[in-house]
Image: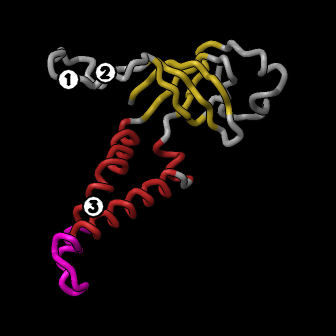
Amino acid sequence: MTERIGLVLNIFDNETAEVMTNKQSACSGCHDTRSCKSCLSGSDKVVAVVQNDACACPGDVVEIQHKTNALMGGAGLFYILPVFGLILAAFMGGAMAAGWGMDESVGALLAGLAGLVISLISVMWFTRTDYGRLHLVPRIVRIVKNESDNRSKGKCCSATNKNQTR
């Protein structure tokens, strides 16, 4: 489970919040500075939309958790499914190209592109389902420091929110 501390920038009606955190290197333990260029994106801050389970308001410092199985499931969904769709459709297109009256390579290319597009559309659809939102998106689990005056004005969440923690 990965945990980060972030600052809430904005909240949305669908119980999500925009949070800014410090960028953590994917290779923070690696010392290969000669060939690795993964950390050259230019900024040390990351802004992400997360589930606002703790009822945080803009200005609050919060703790964000992302479960390991959600991280691995998301990686499989976003990377493996499109590649699998591309390869499977390319093989099927190559095998069926003669029936379509075209060259095997052209059939594999066209079917592979179609498989890639279909799998990417499937990924986009799945991430917008309730299951995808509940299981793949990081969550605010705790308000570390309450810095907002919006809470007293009732602009963030209702007082009856059972998940609110301080």
Q: Quadrant of residue 119?
A: bottom left
Q: Are marks 1 and 3 in contact (CB under 8 Å)?
A: no
Q: Secondary structure at mark 3?
A: helix
Question: How far is the residue under mark 3 from the one under mark 2?
Answer: 29 Å
State the residue at coordinates (61%, 22%): 8
Color scheme of the displayed model: secondary structure
Label 1 Cα crowd, 10 Å radius (few <14 / some 14-19 / many 20+): few
Label number found at residue 36 = 1
Percent x, y of residue 101: 22, 85
Q: Residues within 10 Å of mark 3 (few under 14, many from 20)?
A: many
Tell me, yes or no, whether the two marked residues, 1 and 2, touch with CB atoms within 8 Å: yes
| Amino acid type shown at disc 3 | Leu
The picture quadrant where one finds residue 152 is top right
Label annotation for residue 39: 2
In the image, taking residue 81 as reference, residue 124 lies left or right, namely: right
The amino acid beneath tag 1 is Cys
| Quadrant of residue 29 within the rendered picture | top left
Q: Position of residue 74 (x, y in %)?
A: 38, 45
Q: Residues within 10 Å of mark 2 (few under 14, many from 20)?
A: some
Mark 2: which amino acid? Cys
Q: Would you place residue 106 above or below residue 58 in this image?
A: below
Q: Which residues fall within the magenta stretch?
A: 89-107
Does label 1 or label 3 sit earlier along the sequence? 1
Q: CA distance from mark 1 to mark 2?
A: 8 Å
Where does the image place residue 80, in percent across and percent down from the top left?
29, 51
The residue at which mark 3 appears reads as: 86
Task: Compare residues 157 and 105 and report the one nearer the observer.
Answer: 105
> What residue is drawn where x is 27% and y is 65%?
112
Question: Is 115 situated above or below 83?
Answer: below
Q: Residue at x 34, y 66 (%)?
A: 114
Quadrant of the rendering where the N terminus is positioned:
top left
